[in-house]
Image (cartoon, rainbow, N blue to C red):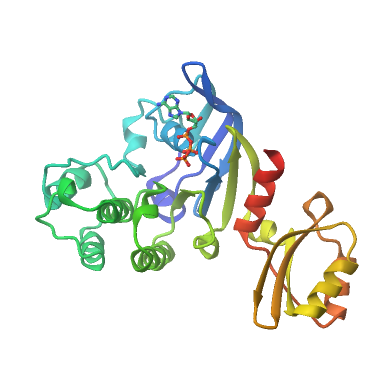
């Protein structure tokens, strides 16, 4: 069993083995297997309906597997009260008391969270301009999302899962959230899962990525390793076009132009770029950079559809 000090410093790992979950006849998860490594920020990516919420709900023991199993820190979460104190899932739907004041909601939430940090909660409420006396029912969608973020971060749960909560927030609030998340994570490492189908903003935060597609695991791995599977080629538009046209066995994932500069994202056969490709790009005097996870995600899920 994991000791409390290990939980504090590294968070809880999740092992999902051959997991299937059905809603009636509909199979939301179909023999999915994956690992969420302890002490990392993980992007759980997938198109609408791919099974992200179902997976997180099963990990948080809100649903029971139809077959297969989930282990959190080596233990099954279902009806495991002690373990549930260490797991925090914030869903876009809220899971708060809509007619009670924010301060009351916080008191209620904090009692079930041994690592709860009141000072952090207060700071986050200030950043997102949420009054302690207001009630969730009176908040806008974005403000309710921000309140979810407050509850998720201030819980400091060894396994914290935020299910698309931040999508309703406006850009300044989202960027404040990303900065605060990173700042707090560096001081208090834990396992943080961010689910989304919009990942370009999250890209820089992610250390590990899981892509679900139609209820199964399409891809899972270290984010840097995935970023290295393709490349961006940047330079003068004409030079980039000439270099990319000369590369055989390369697929273009996206193109962006700014004035005379062009950036093309490429990926090689079997999702690898050989040294011959990178060498030729460098020889042409062009800049080579990592691929954006969003481009890789769109490419992989489109190809599967
Ligand atoms: N309560 C439910 N009853 C019946 N089917 C459901 C229910 N909840 C989800 N599903 C189905 O299960 C599948 C997976 O849904 P899920 O909500 O887990 O996906 P998701 O990846 O979180 O989607 P989104 O990005 O749109 O939130 C979908 O096909 C969905 O229609």
Q: How many marks?
A: 0
Q: Residue at x 51, y 35 (%)?
A: 51
Percent position (x, y) of residue 26?
51, 21
Q: Quadrant for the C terminus, please.
A: top right
As displayed, is residue 229 above or below residue 246?
above
**Splitting the image into 4 quarters, where does residue 15 fall?**
top right
Q: Residue at x 26, y 51 (%)?
A: 144
- Residue 216 as seen in the image, left or right of residue 61: right
Percent position (x, y) of residue 89?
36, 42
Most extreme residue toward the top is: 25
As displayed, is residue 50 above or below residue 294?
above
Percent position (x, y) of residue 138?
15, 50
As displayed, is residue 257 above or below residue 252?
below
Percent position (x, y) of residue 213?
61, 38
**Splitting the image into 4 quarters, where does residue 179 fall?**
bottom left
**Splitting the image into 4 quarters, where does residue 29 fall?**
top right
- Residue 147 as seen in the image, left or right of residue 266: left
Q: Residue at x 81, y 60 (%)?
A: 273
Q: Residue at x 25, y 56 (%)?
A: 143
- Residue 249 as seen in the image, left or right of residue 126: right
As displayed, is residue 305 above or below residue 64?
below
Question: Foreground residue, 251 or 146?
Answer: 251
- Residue 170 as seen in the image, left or right of residue 107: right
Question: Foreground residue, 146 or 226?
Answer: 146
Most extreme residue toward the left is: 133
């Amino acid at each position: 069993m994991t000791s409390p000090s290990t939980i504090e410093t590294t968070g809880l790992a999740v092992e999902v083995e051959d997991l299937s979950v059905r809603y009636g006849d509909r199979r939301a998860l179909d023999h999915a297997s994956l690992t969420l490594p302890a002490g990392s920020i993980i992007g759980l990516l997938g198109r609408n309906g791919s099974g992200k919420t179902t997976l997180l709900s099963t990990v948080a023991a809100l649903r029971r597997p139809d077959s297969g199993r989930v282990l959190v820190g080596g233990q099954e979460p279902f009806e495991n009260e002690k373990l549930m104190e260490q797991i925090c899932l914030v869903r876009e739907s809220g899971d708060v008391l809509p007619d009670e004041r924010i301060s009351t909601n916080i008191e209620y939430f904090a009692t079930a969270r041994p690592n709860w940090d009141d000072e952090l909660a207060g700071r986050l409420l200030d950043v997102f301009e949420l009054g302690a006396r207001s009630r969730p029912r009176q908040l806008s969608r974005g403000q309710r999302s921000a309140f979810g973020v407050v509850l998720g971060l201030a819980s400091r749960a060894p396994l914290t899962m935020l299910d698309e909560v931040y999508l309703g927030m406006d850009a300044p609030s989202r960027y404040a959230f990303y900065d605060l998340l990173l700042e707090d994570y560096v001081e208090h490492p834990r396992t943080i899962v961010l689910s989304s189908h919009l990942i370009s903003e999250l890209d820089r935060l992610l250390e590990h990525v899981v892509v679900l597609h139609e209820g199964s695991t399409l891809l899972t791995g270290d984010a840097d390793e995935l970023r290295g599977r393709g490349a961006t080629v940047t330079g003068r538009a004409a030079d980039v076009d000439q270099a990319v046209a000369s590369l055989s066995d390369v697929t273009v994932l996206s193109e962006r132009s700014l004035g005379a500069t062009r950036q093309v994202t490429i990926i090689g056969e079997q999702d690898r770029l050989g040294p011959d490709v990178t060498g030729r790009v460098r020889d042409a005097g062009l800049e080579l950079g990592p691929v954006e996870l969003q481009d890789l995600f769109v490419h992989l899920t489109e190809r599967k559809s």
